[in-house]
Amino acid sequence: MDSPNPDQAIIISTGRCGSTLLSDLIAEQPDTLSVQEFFVPVGSWIDDEERLSGVEYWSRLSRPGPELTTLFRIGLAPPEVRYPEDGRWAGNLGELPRLLATTLPKISSDPDDLYDTLAELVPGFPAQPAARHHQMFLELLTSLTGRRRWVERSGGSSHIAPSLLRTFPTAKIVYLTRNWVDTAESMRRHSYFQLLELRMDSFRRYGLDPFQVAAGESVPEEMERCLPGRLTARTLRDRGREVGRYLALCAFLASEAEQAIADAGPREVLTMTYEDLVDDPVTQLGRLGRFLGFDEWAQWAHRVAGSVQTRPRGQRGGGSRRAACAGRS
């Protein structure tokens, strides 16, 4: 890598609004490391001020994610999981390190080997707060892959936008939005967002997140079926029957992102909508490439635009900004 301090950018979105598509297209730019699904899996401690040794940081980073472990157990793994069928953990996905679900398979054709390399290097990080560990980890990934910049994207990152903006105050921010009606319809059919809605509803009703209940802690009887060890596929799928739940989730997530951006005032922000992207991909990808500092951004935009499924103008989703926000994972 030419520079020890690579450029950095973060895509913030509610999820289900085109961010996976953007990440995959960004990965086609040879100088850029597209980091997918890194921050949300570590979101609960992204800006933890506790000083961690490199060994402690790697221990946290390499653990299975409780949400994903539960979804594996009930047979509802999200489609974003890209761990290879012949991988080391393929026969024991319940113990799959969170990094190997999506992040490393999207970077390397041999994610287990990259994981082993990181397992040798990351424990050598100095004792420091989690935020600095994240910085060093992403710089290390960028260096190992010979890139000049990293762009991170996690579905539903609006929920941790305040922490992201505090942790990476100099990062370029891409805020991607989509019509709320279409987003909610997609969310209600997606197991991760069914689970997110269940957790947020439980917290609203009982003041407890079922995935943060300590062992032996008592919970209201009606909440017991939401606990990780008792949750079933049927319970989760039932959450997807009412689209109104997900319209409310869209509203909440969008408000979190917009308030965080307003409060933090990042130096560089690019707002994009999924509708504009599918209507005119060359123009919108050109805006994105120029914003991210791509060399020959116009050529990149033309080269990858064919991967965007376009539609005739005049067939965009309608609705007001709040009934249907200009804001896919």
Image: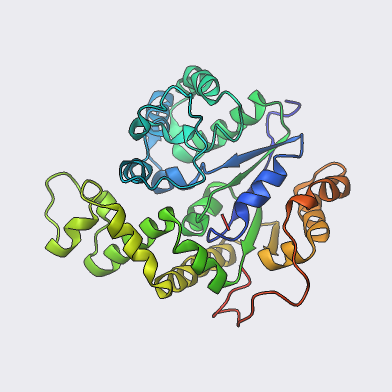
Q: In this orientation, which residue lies closer to the viewer: 298 or 88?
A: 88
Which residue is at 41% across, 54% downward? 191
Quarter in which the C terminus is drawn: bottom right
| Image location (x, y in percent) of residue 91 | 37, 27
Which residue is at 48% across, 19% downward? 124
Q: In this orientation, which residue lies closer to the viewer: 186 or 169?
A: 186
Relative to residue 16, is residue 243 drawn left or right? Answer: left
| Image location (x, y in percent) of residue 86 | 48, 24
264 w.r.t. 245: above or below: above
Q: Quadrant of residue 145?
A: top right
Quarter in which the N terminus is drawn: top right
Which residue is at 88% across, 43% downward? 296
Relative to residue 318, is residue 201 drawn left or right? Answer: left
| Residue 171 seen in render | no
| Image location (x, y in percent) of residue 152 | 60, 44
Q: In this orientation, which residue lies closer to the viewer: 157 or 324?
A: 324
- Residue at the farthest bottom position: 320
Relative to residue 239, is residue 263 drawn left or right? Answer: right
